[in-house]
Image (spheres, rainbow, N blue to C red):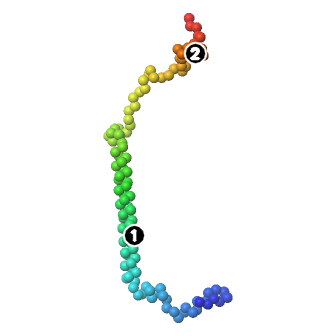
Amino acid sequence: MAIDGMGWDWSYMANEEDHALVADGKDPTEFALMANIENKEEKEVVDGKLARLLKSSKDLENNIESQRSDKVKEGVGYTTVPPAAADLYLSPKKDLSWTGLPEFVDDTVTD
């Protein structure tokens, strides 16, 4: 290969054959078969990954379904919560006068 002052000199290749065309002319079926084999192998790999993904997804759905309560499975959609007992509410001011401590003694006089 020779280089002229402005760039590459490709004139020496004028008489040589086009190697890409020669390679395609020799055994195009061999190259096509090799590509087909590679595509089949890739397809098998992708199919295997897809099958594992679908199995994992199904296993996850089964796991979630098994953890749901019976009422949700029946379609009720909520669980009932019993009301709180009225006696359990705390008074606004705690009555600690029974402790005998002077700060908790109630000095209010009622008539």
Quick check: 59 left or right of 100? left
Mark 1 → mark 2, Cα distance in angstroms: 84 Å
Q: Residue furthest front?
A: 100
Number of the front mark, 1 or 2: 2
Pointer 1: residues within 10 angstroms few (<14), some, or many (20+)?
Answer: few
Residue 42: which disc?
1
Q: Is residue 75 visible?
A: no
Residue located beneath label 2 in the image: 101
**Which residue: 47% across, 85% down?**
20
Q: Amino acid at mark 1?
A: Glu
Residue 69: which disc?
none
Q: Amino acid at mark 2?
A: Leu
Give the mark count. 2
**Which residue: 37% across, 47% down?**
64
x and y percentages locating residue 100 in the rendered image: 55, 14
Q: Is residue 102 visible?
A: yes
Tell me the quadrant of the picture where the C terminus can be found.
Answer: top right
Pointer 2: residues within 10 angstroms few (<14), some, or many (20+)?
Answer: few
Q: Are marks 1 and 2 in contact (CB under 8 Å)?
A: no
Relative height, residue 35 to residue 100 (above, below):
below
Q: Earlier in the sequence, mark 1 or mark 2?
A: 1
Q: Residue furthest right?
A: 5
